[in-house]
Each structure stands twice: as structure tokens, then as C-alpha cells.
Image (tube, rainbow, N blue to C red):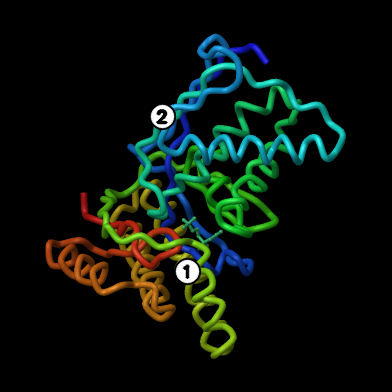
């Protein structure tokens, strides 16, 4: 494997639809405007073998590659010898609901797609399989929006629909500095489903409606109906945040930050991603 390779992929954030998307609801997700991950591969950059830098996190990437190799070889396919220097640079905080592992999976999949002969059609599924190593089973939403690099609506098993919008409202991102594993948050929602299936179903429906409001709002805003658009996005975000609250995924510190942002004039504030911490996203009149 001798070609140089370089790719940048964005972080992602979710406007509405978290958790319910795992049971067929629509979700709305966007690429993050600033945070991103970049990988560069230089075949001449090592003296034999694959060197991954920086040191921090390199073992995880080597383990990921060796899991791909094992799977590849178990299906009697030849895995190319990887010799060179793989450099990974990321400004995406880990475990914060901004898609750090999905961004890595998309970038690694693109890098290996040529030497492994993975077609464009199969690339999405390949990246999702990689992401399952980090999160257990995921809906594929993170991989879909990071691959699309533009705002999408998403339904599991049906895939992404690019929204084709150019103008979006002003959103800001606020770190609660709390971290939670996606899998633990998913388990908490599952537990509620066992304890109170009727409530769980109502929350999934409410989150699904939140996505519809948010989606409608984005489209209205883009088409020039800014006041109406903001109103619908606000409605969607507020309803989504109430779902997080009912799932008990809004820790005290995140709630206090939410109140502060609202007091400062934000139209709506919600967690983005699986919840339990991570980032809050705030909507503002621009
Ligand atoms: O990967 P996270 O933490 O942004 O969570 C994504 C949203 C979930 O619906 C909770 C999980 C999924 O796979 O869709």
C-alpha cells in the first residue's frame, strides 16, 4: 500500500431525534461548523510497520485496524501490508456527543477503501460496522451526517436525505464538561422502556414530532421565512430537551447551564447526542 492519503471530516451534532431514531424515528443532524478530524498517511514516514501518531489514542487506532484485518482475513481476503506513518489530528472532544469516534471511522474507512476495494455503495456499511466497536449497535446517524458533510434528515435502515439547505439559524455550542458513554445513555432509555412502556412510547413519539418541527423550521428559515423558521426550530428543540429530561439524561450541571443560556436570551437550549452531559446547543435570533 503505497499511496499518500489525506482527508478531513467534520464533527457532527444532532438537532433532534436522539434515541427515538434507534426505533425508527426521523432524526435531524448537521456537520459541526468548526470541529473536525484529519488523517494523513505517508507511506515513507516509518522504518517498517505502521506508526500512528500522536501517541495518545494510537493504540485504539492500531486495535481498530487490526480488527479490520482479522475480519478481512477471516473471509479469506488479502489485507494489504500497511507501512508508513498515519497522523491523526482532531479538535473533536471525545465522548461529548459530537461524533469523535464516528469521524475516525469515516476517515479510516475512506483511507482503506481503495486498498481494500470497498465500493462507494458499501463504504457506509463498512464505517457503521467500525463504529459498532465503539458504541455497540448504533443507528448509523453519526456516520451518515459526517459522510454527507451537510444537514440531513435520517431514518435508520432507510439512510440519509440531504436537506439541501444553505442558510441555517445561529447555533452556539456549550460544553457541560460532563461526559457520558452513549451505550450507558441508551441503556437508561431501554430501562425506562421496560419499567413504563407506555411512557417510553409517548417519549419516542414526542421526540419524533420534535424532529418534524425542527426539520420544518430549518426548511422555512432557509427559504426566507426566518421568524416562522426560528419558531419551529425552537419548538422542536424545546420538545427534544423535555424528552431528555424525562429520560433522566439532563444532569444538574447541564440544567443550570441551560437556564443560564436561556436567561442570556437563547431561544431554546438542548443537549445534543446521547445526553448525560456532553454539549448543549443554543439557538439565537441572529
Ligand atoms: O453518538 P451520540 O452520543 O451522538 O448519540 C447518537 C444518538 C443516539 O440516538 C443516542 C444513538 C444512535 O446510534 O443513534
Side (left or right) of 37 relative to 134: left
Determine the CA span between mark 2 and mark 1: 30 Å
Residue that mark 2 sits on? 54
Whether residue 230 is situated above or below residue 86 in the rendered picture: below
Q: Residues within 10 Å of mark 1 (few under 14, many from 20)?
A: many
N-terminal-most mark, 2 or 1 = 2
Confirm or reject: label 1 Cβ below 8 Å from ligand 1.
Answer: yes
Element type at mark 2: loop
As drawn, which residue projects farthest toward the top?
A: 44
Whether residue 16 is situated above or below residue 192 in the rendered picture: above
As drawn, which residue projects farthest toward the right?
A: 76
Locate residue 197, reporting x and y percent: 58, 88
Side (left or right) of 65 relative to 6: right
The foreground one among 21 and 223 is 21
Q: Residue at x 35, y 69 (%)?
A: 235
Whether residue 25 is situated above or below residue 225 in the rendered picture: below
The foreground one among 60 and 116 is 60
Instruction: For the N terminus, give its image quadrant.
Output: top right
Locate residue 21, reporting x and y percent: 57, 64
Residue that mark 1 sits on? 185
Locate residue 59, reporting x and y percent: 51, 38
Side (left or right) of 40 relative to 176: right
Element type at mark 1: helix
Q: Residue at x 45, y 42 (%)?
A: 165
Side (left or right) of 113 relative to 72: left
Amino acid at each position: 500500500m503505497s499511496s499518500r492519503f489525506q482527508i478531513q471530516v467534520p464533527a457532527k451534532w444532532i438537532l433532534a431525534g436522539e434515541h427515538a431514531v434507534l426505533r425508527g424515528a426521523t432524526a435531524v443532524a448537521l456537520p459541526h461548523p468548526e470541529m473536525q478530524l484529519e488523517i494523513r498517511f505517508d507511506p515513507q514516514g516509518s522504518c517498517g510497520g505502521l506508526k500512528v501518531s500522536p501517541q495518545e489514542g494510537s493504540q485504539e487506532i492500531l486495535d481498530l485496524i487490526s480488527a479490520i484485518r482479522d475480519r478481512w482475513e477471516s473471509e479469506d481476503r488479502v489485507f494489504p501490508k500497511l507501512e508508513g506513518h498515519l497522523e491523526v489530528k482532531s479538535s473533536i472532544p471525545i465522548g461529548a456527543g459530537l461524533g469523535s469516534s464516528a469521524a475516525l471511522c469515516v476517515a479510516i474507512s475512506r483511507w482503506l477503501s481503495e486498498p481494500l476495494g470497498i465500493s462507494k455503495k458499501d463504504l457506509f456499511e463498512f464505517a457503521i460496522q467500525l463504529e459498532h466497536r465503539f458504541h455497540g449497535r448504533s443507528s448509523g446517524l453519526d456516520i451518515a451526517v459526517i459522510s454527507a458533510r451537510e444537514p440531513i434528515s435520517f431514518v435508520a435502515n432507510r439512510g440519509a436525505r440531504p436537506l439541501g439547505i444553505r442558510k441555517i439559524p445561529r447555533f452556539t455550542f456549550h460544553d457541560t464538561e460532563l461526559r457520558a458513554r452513549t451505550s450507558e445513555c441508551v441503556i437508561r432509555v431501554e430501562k425506562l422502556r421496560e419499567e413504563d412502556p407506555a411512557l417510553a412510547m409517548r417519549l419516542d413519539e414526542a421526540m419524533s414530532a420534535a424532529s418534524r418541527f425542527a426539520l420544518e423550521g430549518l426548511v422555512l428559515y432557509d427559504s426566507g421565512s426566518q421568524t416562522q423558521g426560528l419558531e419551529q426550530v425552537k419548538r422542536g428543540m424545546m420538545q427534544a430537551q423535555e424528552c431528555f429530561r424525562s429520560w433522566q439524561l439532563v444532569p444538574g450541571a447541564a440544567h443550570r447551564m441551560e437556564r443560564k443560556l436561556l436567561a442570556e436570551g437563547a431561544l431554546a437550549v438542548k443537549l445534543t447526542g446521547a445526553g448525560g452531559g456532553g454539549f448543549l446547543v443554543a439557538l439565537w435570533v441572529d
